[in-house]
Amino acid sequence: MNHETVQSYYGEVLQSSDDLQTNACCSPDDMPDHVKAVLAQIHDDVLTRYYGCGLIAPLALEGARILDLGCGAGRDVYALSAMVGETGLVVGVDMTATQLDVARAHQDYHAEKFGHAHSNVEFHHGFIEQLEALDLEPGSFDIIVSNCVINLATDKAAVLRGAHRLLKQGGEMYFSDVYADRRIPKAMAEDDMLYGECLSGALYWNDFLSLAKDSGFDDPRRVTARALTIENPVLEARVEPLKFLSATYRLFKLEGLEPACEDYGQAVIYRGTIPHAPHYFELDDHHLIEAGKVFPVCGNTWRMLQDTRFAPHFEFIGDFDTHYGIFAGCGGESPFNEMDSGGVSTCC
């Protein structure tokens, strides 16, 4: 699949989210109230051209520099601009000029809506596989987000390598995308509609984990996952027997993370000080950390809290002096198997 096909689908074929043929590029409804309140202030012209598949609003964003890969008409850029505040910056990159025209037309509107003296967003026209060609400083972003776009990329490894290059040490890539339970057959991968609908460009979930690690993102952490139902009988028949899910992952740029969850007898205590999370902090789908409670963690999880923007919100117990082996139950189970069994893995 080439860039021109995707540009045509998102710039000409789709005029609004109502034109989508499946639910793969649709966001789930279970989003926090503070996010809903921000989205309610986004201009209608921007909202109607939204094609995302998840929620990319991690916590602790005040003052952050964020890059949105495949920003489209700017819905997530503008939502995040409210969350980072006037001292933060949100940069959007997209290859579709018509989408960026919509985004740029509403910069002043959103600055005024969110009470900012000036716009704290900017937009760049370019390919997310060629981030090095853009005027973006390496190591300058705290967070990189992307919403159901990497599956459309022609070179997914290049996207991840470029993201790693642009992140600060201790920064994270926090993104939602579509994954398949097996590798996509060649004929399906060449189907323009299925590609544009975020299905036939989806990575096999285990290939994604390998790509992430090869790009420098060790120990990928899945935050959420939900099964995708095509809800279009004709297209459903064209993708069978494959299954798809939408998942949100966080990838940290941290040197020296280990390939498994190793036990050093460490623990953390969440202070309850992150805005919108007074009682719990959810690092990923098996780390729901209750405020005030001693919570045992592996060495990698310790690093993901100690060496990132989350550090001020935790107390840290222990060090790396003594190794006690691996946490029982840690492993790379298929998220599809976990869905079929009605649960998620538990480790560290």
Image (cartoon, rainbow, N blue to C red):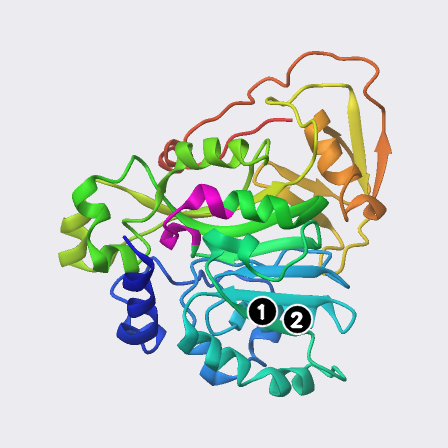
Q: Residues within 10 Å of mark 1 (few under 14, many from 20)?
A: many
Figure check: 204 above or below 320: below
Disc number for residue 137: none
Asked where in the image residue 204 lies, by quadrant, the reply is top left
> Which amino acid type is shown beneath numbered disc 1?
Val
Could you tell me which secondary element the residue under label 2 belongs to?
helix
The residue tagged 2 is 81
Figure check: 270 above or below 348: below
**Residue ID at (49%, 48%):** 159
> Which amino acid type is shown beneath numbered disc 2?
Ser
Asked where in the image residue 324 lies, by quadrant, the reply is top right
Q: Are marks 2 and 1 in contact (CB under 8 Å)?
A: yes
The one nearer the camera, 128 or 297, is 128
Q: Is residue 318 visible?
A: yes
Figure check: 257 above or below 263: below
Residues drawn in magenta: 150-159
**Residue ID at (62%, 83%):** 110
